[in-house]
Image (cartoon, helix red, strand yellow):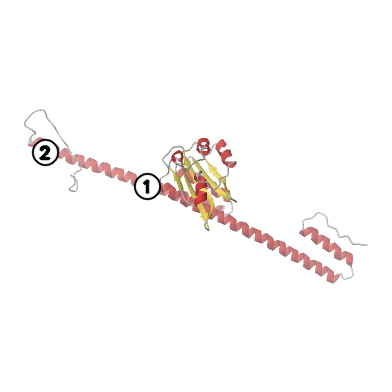
Amino acid sequence: MRGGLPLGVVALGSRERGGFTDTQIELLKTFAEQAVIAITSAETYRELQQRTDDLREALQRQTATADVLKVISRSAFDLQAVLDTLVESAGKLCNATMTNIWLRDGDVLRSQAQLGLSEAFSEFLRTHPTTRDRGKFVGRAFLTGQLVHLPDVLADPEYTFVESPKIGQFRSALGVPMIRHGEVEGVFALAKPEPGGFADREIELVRTFADQALIAIENVRLFDEVQARTRDLQESLQQQTATADVLKVISRSTFDLRKVLETLVQSAARLCDAEKANIFQHD
């Protein structure tokens, strides 16, 4: 008994009549109490082990997340470095043999970062961009914008892309859509060779990594926009400066046509990255 509740029964039997002596009964009671102590100790040990394992996994997840954030901060405008770190961390922490990040290119998804894929499977995915298709687990996530978790792709009635698990040698799959402003920008995909799928904590971890991938993508997009606008402003400033220079020459050399024309062709060549520039006058 423990806390007024029975944990089990210690039973003895004998071929001889007469039962057991009081001493034997008391000894059996002692053994029963020791059994309760042993059971309690074992349960406490298992609970401590489970808590230790949970804490270890939580620490690994936090460390991996921190590592990814460090990469994002150091490589804010190097999208490939961030994606490579994400697939490596996700694969290791989720015990996935294959990890892949697909990014949208128009109406299809293309593999942008991958880990654990054979050369043959990598080439297969390169030549088979994913469309919005319920028959593929990545394509289904692309189509619906919903997480797709298939504990066994071969047992899923909608899964028809049988060439993929055959070449890639996987049975369970997970696809987490990466959504920005209501649009699927990509899919974070993981796979394992055996059926069984992924634990809830693994799925939540991949959701976190998918969010971080979106942050990296947005950082690069904003950086590219700033760079493009900066180039436009620089070109505009150069054009305005050249125009002002020509006007100065015209004002100073009103009756020196040749000098004005030379200034014009020099400015035109410089601003247009031309090797030669000419002005032809009709005679």
Q: Residue at x 15, y 39 (%)?
A: 30
Q: Is residue 9 left or right of residue 66?
A: left
Who is closer to the viewer here, 6 or 111? 111
Mark 2 → mark 1, Cα distance in angstroms: 42 Å
Residue 125, placed above or below residue 233: above
Residue 44 makes an appearance in the image: yes
How packed mark 2 is, by other alpha carbons closer than 10 Å (few <14, some 14-19, many 20 or more), is few
* Residue 54 numbered tag: 1
Q: Where does the N terminus fall, quadrant-wise?
A: top left
Residue 266, placed above or below residue 115: below
- Residue 195: percent from left, percent from top: 43, 38
Residue type at tag 1: Asp
* Residue 201 numbered tag: none
Sequence-first disc among 2 and 1: 2
Residue type at tag 2: Glu
- Residue 202: percent from left, percent from top: 43, 47
Q: Residue furthest left?
A: 18
Q: Residue at x 52, y 50 (%)?
A: 143
Who is closer to the viewer here, 59 or 17? 17
How packed mark 1 is, by other alpha carbons closer than 10 Å (few <14, some 14-19, many 20 or more), is few
- Residue 184: percent from left, percent from top: 53, 53
| Residue indicated by mark 2 | 26
- Residue 35: percent from left, percent from top: 20, 39
Q: Residue at x 13, y 37 (%)?
A: 27
Q: Where does the C terminus fall, quadrant-wise?
A: bottom right
Q: Is residue 229 left or right of residue 57?
A: right
